[in-house]
Amino acid sequence: MERLTHVPPRSSPEGTTQLDKRLNKANYVFLKNKPIRESLSPTFLGPFKVLEKYDRYFKVQLGSKVDNISKDRLRPAFGIEEILPETPNVHLTRSTSTF
């Protein structure tokens, strides 16, 4: 035990984070849920549409409001364009015609 020495912790370069490289190409993203959440609640929410992309954050459409969200809380969502059409489906909209 006397020969054991203290090993200092590894230092990492400041400001480096592990972001998915595909995030800058994604048109839709998943948003990380709150850090403290109820049990069995999902880790990520979404998908949400990306409106604008900046160096450190994205402007994202969250339902009826728009919010700026840090890239650290986002994950790319691919294949959503085929599932969520931009224009509403004509057959699914309610018509108000009178006879």
Image (cartoon, grey):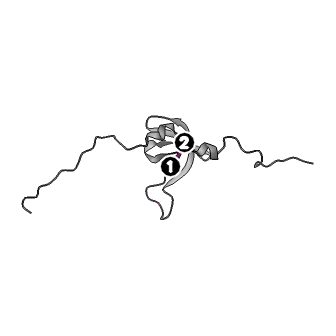
Which residue does the image show at 44% across and 34% down from the upper left? 55
Q: Which residue corresponds to mark 1?
A: 31
In the rendered image, which quarter contains the N terminus? bottom left
SS for tag 2? strand
> Depth check: 97 or 89 in front?
89
Mark 2 Cα shell of 10 Å, populated few (<14), some (14-19), many (≥20):
many
Is disc 1 in contact with disc 2, using a CB cutoff of under 8 Å? Answer: yes
Question: Is 31 contained in the magenta span?
Answer: yes
- Percent across and percent down for residue 5 are 11, 55
The CA span between labels 1 and 2 is 10 Å
Instruction: Inspect the image, locate mark 1, and give the three-letter code of the amino acid beneath it.
Output: Leu
- Percent across and percent down for residue 93 are 76, 48
Position above or below: 51 against 38: above
Which residue does the image show at 47% across and 60% down from the upper left? 37
- Percent across and percent down for residue 54 are 47, 34
SS for tag 1? strand
Q: Earlier in the sequence, mark 1 or mark 2?
A: 1
Q: Which residue corresponds to mark 2?
A: 60
Which residue does the image show at 48% across and 54% down from the upper left? 33
Q: In this view, does 89 lie to the left or right of 29?
A: right
Which residue does the image show at 47% across and 40% down from the upper left? 22
Q: Is residue 58 left or right of residue 5?
A: right
Q: What is the magenta range?
A: 27-37
Q: Which residue in the rendered view is the most extreme toward the left?
A: 2
Q: Is residue 42 left or right of residue 82?
A: left
Q: Which residue in the rendered view is the most extreme toward the bottom?
A: 39
Label drawn at residue 71: none
Question: Is 46 contained in the magenta span?
Answer: no
Instruction: Inspect the image, locate mark 2, and give the three-letter code of the amino acid beneath it.
Output: Val
